[in-house]
């Protein structure tokens, strides 16, 4: 049985992503942090890890991007999961009783409008499902958690409202990580990191390597290098496998124009009806 690490408690969206990608016959291994998922995968105490990388409403998950800089793991898969949030309480709690709302910062941000209508105070936690467990374990009667309906079922809690996210088209993209490369696929994406010299036109010329070779970029994200202020690493996803002729040419051209380049991996692109 494959062991797959994810961040959060049982009932977390990351756990759902694990079962969506690998099917029911895997051992889902909960971890406290995204860093722990990376470390366990790199140490091979699990076969794979699943980490969130971006949300369609709230944007990128910075910790995941930062971990890719120092970790040796490869990206071997992609999962796109529809996120539907629920307001979850202890069975005795009514809507009028709620003074506090617990959840992960991303979930709280995705439900700003609904929370504002409650007039409740926000309390951030490390995990959506973990917030359900917290209000249950503490027996809080004036608090609610934002998490999945599955989390409510697991912890025997009550759902007061469903679909409370501000925008209906709410999706989170996860990446599957491993110490081994993915097998070649016809419909692949490739993820890379690079940095450029701090001179005019450096990024323009770097990105030209993809245009010159007819490759479509699907994502570009910048993160501070933390070495000098206002200098950045660029995380780029593009369509194609790193071993394809056009991709090889583009990566070779890019390497000649940047000061740092790391290929995170090529992997099958997730196909989801959005």
Image (cartoon, rainbow, N blue to C red):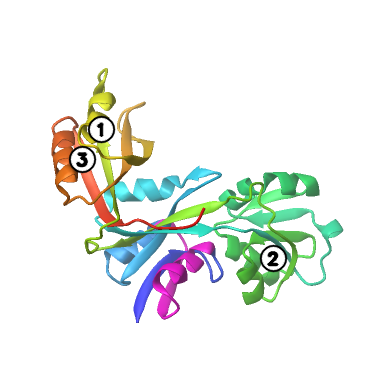
How far apart marks 1 and 3 lie (CA) works out to 18 Å
In the figure, is residue 273 to the left or right of 222? right
Circle 2 Cα neighbour tier, 10 Å, few/some/many (<14 / 14–19 / ≥20): many
Q: Which residue is mark 1?
A: 211
Q: Are marks 2 and 1 in contact (CB under 8 Å)?
A: no
What segment is highlighted magenta in the picture? 13-34
Which mark is nearer the camera, 1 or 3?
1
How far apart marks 3 and 2 lie (CA) works out to 45 Å
- Measured as percent of width and height from the top left, residue 171 is found at 53, 53
* Residue at 30% from the left image edge and 33% from the top image edge: 227
Residue 120: mark: none
Residue 261: mark: 3
In the figure, is residue 58 to the left or right of 214? right
- Measured as percent of width and height from the top left, residue 218 is found at 37, 42
Residue 74 part of the magenta segment: no
Q: Which residue is mark 2?
A: 135
| Residue 213, placed above or below residue 12 | above
- Measured as percent of width and height from the top left, residue 133 is found at 63, 69
Question: Looking at the figure, which quarter contains the N terminus?
Answer: bottom left
Which mark is nearer the camera, 2 or 1?
1
Q: Would you say residue 196 is visible in this rendering?
A: no
Residue 31 part of the magenta segment: yes
| Residue 153, placed above or below residue 83 | below
* Residue at 13% from the left image edge and 39% from the top image edge: 252
Nearer the N terminus, badge 3 or badge 2?
A: 2
List the single residue furthest toward the top.
200
How far apart marks 2 and 1 lie (CA) works out to 52 Å
């Amino acid at each position: 049985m494959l062991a797959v690490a994810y961040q959060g408690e049982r009932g977390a969206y990351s756990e759902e992503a694990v079962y969506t990608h690998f099917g029911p016959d895997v051992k889902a291994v909960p971890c406290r942090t995204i860093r722990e998922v990376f470390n366990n995968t790199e140490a091979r105490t699990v076969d794979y890890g699943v980490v969130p990388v971006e949300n369609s409403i709230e944007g990128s998950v910075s910790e995941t991007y930062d971990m890719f800089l120092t970790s040796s793991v490869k990206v071997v898969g992609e999962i796109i999961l529809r996120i539907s949030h629920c307001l979850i309480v202890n069975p005795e709690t009514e809507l009028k009783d709620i003074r506090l709302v617990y959840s992960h910062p991303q979930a709280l941000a995705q439900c700003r409008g609904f929370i504002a209508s409650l007039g409740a105070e926000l309390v951030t936690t490390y995990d959506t499902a973990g917030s359900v467990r917290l209000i249950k374990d503490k027996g809080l009667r004036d608090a609610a958690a934002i998490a999945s309906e599955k989390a409510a079922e697991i912890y025997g809690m009550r759902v007061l409202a469903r679909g409370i996210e501000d925008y209906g088209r709410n999706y989170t993209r996860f990446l599957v990580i491993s110490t081994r490369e993915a097998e070649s696929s016809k419909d692949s994406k490739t993820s890379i990191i690079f940095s450029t010299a701090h001179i005019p036109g450096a990024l323009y010329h770097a990105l030209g390597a993809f245009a010159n070779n007819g490759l479509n970029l699907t994502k570009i994200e910048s993160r501070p290098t933390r070495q000098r202020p206002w200098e950045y690493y660029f995380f780029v996803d593009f369509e194609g496998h790193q071993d394809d002729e056009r991709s090889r040419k583009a990566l070779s051209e890019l390497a000649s124009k940047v000061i740092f380049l790391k290929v995170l991996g090529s992997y099958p692109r997730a196909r989801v009806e959005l």
